Every structure is written in C-alpha cells, then in structure tokens.
Image: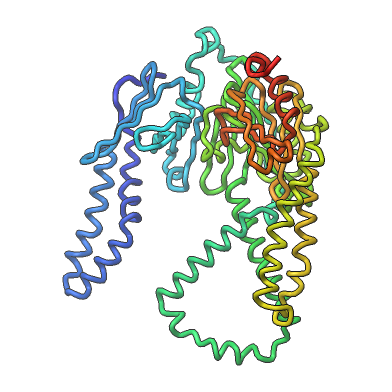
Amino acid sequence: MIDVEWQRVDPRMLLVYPVRELVRFLPVLIGLFIAGSASGRTDWWHGAGIAIPMLLGVLRYFTTYFRITETRVELRRGLLNRHQLSTALDRVRTVDISASLTHRALGLTTVRIGTGTASKDDEDHLDLDGLPAVRARELRTELLRLGVPAAAQGTEAGEPDRVVLRFDPAWVRFAPLTTTGLVLAGGALGVAAQGVNTFGGFDRFNPDELVDSTAGWSAALAIPIGIVLLLVAVSALAIGGYVVTNWGFTLTHTGPERRGAWHLRRGLLTTRETTLDDDRVSGVTVAAPLGLRLAGGGRISAIVTGLGGDGSGSSLLAPPAPRAVVERVASEVLGTSAPLDAPLAGHGPQARKRRYTRALAPTAVVVATVVLLVGLDEIGLWSLAVVLALPAAALLARDRAAALGHTLVSGHVVARSGSLDRRRDALAVHGVIGWNLRSSWFQRRAGLTTLVATTAGGRQSVTVLDVPDGAALDLAHRAMPDLVSQFLHH
C-alpha cells in the first residue's frame, strides 16, 4: 500500500488538535482569566483566549501532510514555520503504534517510525499522529516488508504469530524493587510541594508548632513508622506505574515465511505496539539490578541495529519478571541459550584488585574527611554510617569483581559486569562493526584494557571491562579474524 500523493491524517483529529492546543496554552489562559477579571472585560478576554488555541489546532490539521513513496516516508507540517521530515524506507528500524485514551475513544493511533538517523532537527523518528487503527497496522506491515522479494511478499498464508510471552499479574511483586516508585514518588512530591506553595501553604506553616506537637514522640518509634509509611507509598506508586505501563504485555513472533519480526503490545491507559524486524535484532541485554537480582528477577531488552540509545523503550522485550522467564525470552530471541548458560572467562587478579581500589579508596577519603572535619565526638547518630561505610564498599567491590567475565560462544560476544545494575550483553558477531581498545594510565600499569565492541544498535557498544591485554586481543581476533589479524604482529 504505497501512497504517492500527499494526504492528511484522519479528520477526527479536528476533535483532538484544538483540545491539545488548549491544554498547551493553559498557563496563558489562566493569566488571561486573571487579567480579564481585573479589567472587567471578562467575556472578551476569555473568548479570545479560548478561540485562538482552538484555531491553531484546526490550522495544525490543515497544514499536516504525509506520503509514502516507493523509496521514502515524508512528513510535512507547519504554516509559518514549515517543517519537513523525510527518510528512506530502507532506514526504517522499528514501527511503534500507540494510542492514548482519547485516540482509543476515536479509533485513532499514532505511528512512530524509528529510523535510527538524525534529521535536520536531530529527530530520529517520524510521527504520523491520527491514523485509523486498521490503517496503522497495514502501514506497519508494509513498511517492514519493503525490500522483500515479490514472491515472499505475496505469501499471505502461513502459521499465525507465535505467542512467546504474556503478562502475568504475579509479576507486580517485582515493581517495588525497581526505581520506578522512587521516580514517581519524587514527581508526586514535587507536584504536591508546588501546589502547597501556590496556595500559600508554606507561608502558614509554623515549624515551632510541629516541634511542640511531636515533642512527646519517641524517635525509636517515629523513625521506623515514617520509614514504613514511605516504603508503602513508594511501593504503591511503583506497582501502579508497572500495571499502567505493562498491563496486557504480549510478545509474539512472526515466522520467517512472512519476514520474521517481533511484535510487542502493552499498556492499560495508553496502548503501545512495537514491531522489531528480525534482521535488525543483533542481540539482547539481560539486566538484573540489585533488588531484582536478590528477588530472582530481571529484565531484557533487544540490541536493535540502528536504534539510538533513547530508543530503549522500543527495544524492551519483557518487563521486570522472574529470571527464568527473562532467560527463556532471551533464548528465543538469540536462537540459543548458550550465551546465557556458558561459563565466562574471569579477568584475573589485577581486575579484581582494581574493583577493590576503586571502591575502597574514595570511601576511605570521605570517611577520613568527615572524621577530621566533624570529629569523633560530634558524629553522633552518623557514627553507624561511618563505621559501615568501608565494609559496605568492600562488599560492593567483591560483587563487582565476581561479575566480571566474557566469552565468545555460538557466534555471540558475551560480556558481564556491574553490581547495583548487573548486565549481561550478548551481541551477535555479525552485529559488530569494529573494535576499540581503551586503557587509562592506571589500567596500563595493571596490564588491563577495556575492549569495546562497536555496533549500530542500542547503546552503540558492548563493553568488556578491565580485561587483560592478551585476552582482549584474543577475543577480538577469534570473533573477527579477518579484521583484527591485519593489525597483529606476526
């Protein structure tokens, strides 16, 4: 379905654009309301304040066009400041279909075409906002099938999409172990503080009254209660965010007879559908932050060729879930479980020593500075933190040292590192476009280097941290002998 002529989005967007502009101009409208009330010209000011944004919304509809030719996707919008985006069809990496509550009520969607490239204003995607749901799914199929031989394109019959993963409500137990709750709690606290400040709440706040009212409280009782209430609030926010984002999470795979692709759907209020072409998926990243790791959980994302680092949401393959579920999905995507199960080569005593040095030295400096500036007699309640700082740093260093490892197995470069956010990257060798070897002055003294497998996807690289010089060259040479051998001395 190729659209050569310029066309507009669905006319139902005439109900959406004016409302969006009203919301965008809300601060201005509030100012006009106050100014109009003060001048006694309420009707005129209020009418102009509402009519102008709505007119802008209508103009936005009539000045937005798109078309899809045999070779390109083009989007044109704007009246005074004309803005045009264009990308080649062979640069399309992902196609996301999302629908807010308003869009769902009207049967509309927003199609985001991820290109992995930067346009004139540094955007790496095109948004076609206001397509009917059926048209959006047809467009997704056509965009990801372009370039396939005609015989393959004509093969409509075949096995239905295979369901790889469905959302399990029991997974919400992992939500409080992520940072989502903290982020939402921080945002809620900021909004609440701003609201209190707007209505003069802080001006009426009397700290002396608060001190008097809590004077009889026991610190041993008040502090634990406060911590428990905070944890409950953060956990509730994390669970709510997890459910709203991931409810209905479904991962399916289209067989190779119809050009293999991974399809993801999720969302409770705003639904989102993502399609990743098999040819673009070069590997996976299995992450296990400390909280998830202790609870036996993890999460997984795909390394998608050409998808920038800010496209991590599009590369998600599973929400925080049990470790067994994450590893099963990773095995499905990689086509083998070897990169997840294979033992990793350690990085030796120098790398372990470096982990301890980097953890203990800064901690010792901070502890010594606190003791010198405050004095042991004045530390008081903070003495426990000072005493535990060095042992905690040592435990962190031990965990980071144990995480270091790498291997080359089943055509994948595998690297693991980290403690608070442990990651295991498995990148297919065909996705490696180059090698970088970096070493600081301290690394050179220890005979270590950082080997970076450069790729065009995800974070743009997979890093093998603090590996011995000889092991780094050996890994790069075994993975890509034709590329590396020309730089080795024989």
In what quadrant of the picture does the C terminus appear? Answer: top right
Above or below, 77 against 338 in this view is below
Q: Is residue 261 visible?
A: no
Q: Residue at x 55, y 10 (%)?
A: 152
- Looking at the image, residue 214 sits to the left or right of residue 21; the answer is right
Q: Position of residue 155 (x, y in %)?
A: 56, 12
Q: Is residue 264 visible?
A: yes
In the displayed structure image, the side of residue 133 where residue 174 appears, left or right: right
Query: Which residue is painted at 55% across and 90% down in the image?
Result: 208
In this rendering, position of residue 184 left or right of residue 44: right
Residue 314 figure quarter: top right
Q: Position of residue 478 (x, y in %)?
A: 72, 19
- Count how many numbered circles sit on residues in the image: 0
Q: Quarter of the image containing the N terminus? A: top left
Quick one: 271 or 334, which is closer to the camera? 334
Q: Position of residue 251 (x, y in %)?
A: 64, 34
Scheme of colours in the image:
rainbow
Quadrant location of residue 215?
bottom right
Toward the top, the furthest residue is 151
Quarter location, residue 27: bottom left
The residue sitting at 81% across, 30% down in the picture is: 342
Residue 285 vs residue 365, the one in the foreground:
365
> As rendered, which of 298 and 410 lies closer to the eye?
410
Residue drawn at the location 22% of the way across and 64% of the way down: 46
Q: In the rendered image of this protein, does residue 428 appear above or below residue 46?
A: above
Q: Residue 73 in the image: x percent, y percent?
A: 38, 25
